[in-house]
Amino acid sequence: MATVTIENYLKALFTLNQLNSSISLTDLSKEMKVSAPTVNNMIKKLQDKGWVEYQKYKPIKLTTEGCIQAAAIIRKHRLTEIFLVKIMGFGWEEVHDIAEQIEHIKSDMYFDRMDELLGFPKTDPHGSPIPDKTGKIAEQHFKTLAQIKPNTKVSIVALKNSSFELLDYLNKKNIKLGDSIQIISIEPFDKSCSILLNETTKMTMTQQVCTCLMVVE
């Protein structure tokens, strides 16, 4: 049975793999905020379990079984987040740390019942896909708002990251998933955007925020 630490490493590897298929010990060390020797020792343990493949000076690769194990943890985390928001009334900025604790519960029945109560949701409160029970995770082919040309109307469907700082900013601006946005103009100097939110509210949005909002036309 995987320990909490091992599960956190698997989740970190899964997350890094979504961004870049070539994962180094340095990448994992930064993600976990621990030393390279500590990471190296853990990789050996994961390799012994058959969950990663690793050779010195080469990228770390999750095996098929490693991906299944990691996706199961991601599934628990994201189901918990949507449960906390939809059923318990938490804000989307409040749920990450709580889900970090609950995701390590071993009972599959617990999370299956949670899934059923929620009506089998496909995404978490931040628009990230929830892996199914077999570990499969839906690919998302969204654009960022920063990639959209002026006068194009789009809807916000997900966030590139769910940091507290971003969520707090969106709350203050009353921006949420499902909102419509039309870019009015783009400032040539810093690429900030003048936008129309839900056809009523005009505001300026920095390029940094625009790159964090995933949208569809």
Image (cartoon, rainbow, N blue to C red):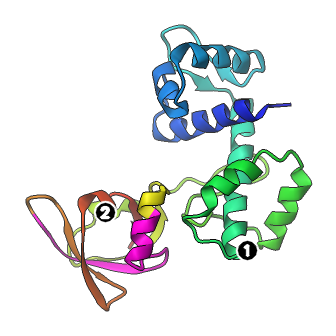
- Provide the residue span drawn in magenta: 167-187
Q: Quadrant of residue 87?
A: bottom right
User: Element under label 2?
Assistant: helix
Looking at the rendering, in which quadrant would you find the C terminus? bottom left
Q: CA distance from mark 1 to mark 2?
A: 30 Å
Give the vertical position of 73 relative to 81 (above or below).
above
Q: Which residue is mark 2?
A: 210
Residue drawn at (78%, 47%) of the image: 134
Mark 2, Cα crowd under 10 Å, few <14 / some 14-19 / many 20+, is many
Side of 186 relative to 86 (left or right): left
Q: Percent x, y for residue 26?
A: 46, 21
Q: Nearer the viewer, mark 1 or mark 2?
A: 1
Q: Secondary structure at mark 1?
A: loop
Q: Is residue 48 above or below residue 27?
A: above
Q: Is residue 131 visible?
A: no
The disc label shown at residue 143, or none = none
User: Residue type at mark 1?
Assistant: Met
Query: Where residue 146 appears, x then y in whole percent?
Result: 28, 61
**Measuring 46% from the left and 54% from the top, which residue is drawn there?**
161
Quick one: quadrant of the N terminus?
top right
Q: Which residue is mark 1?
A: 88
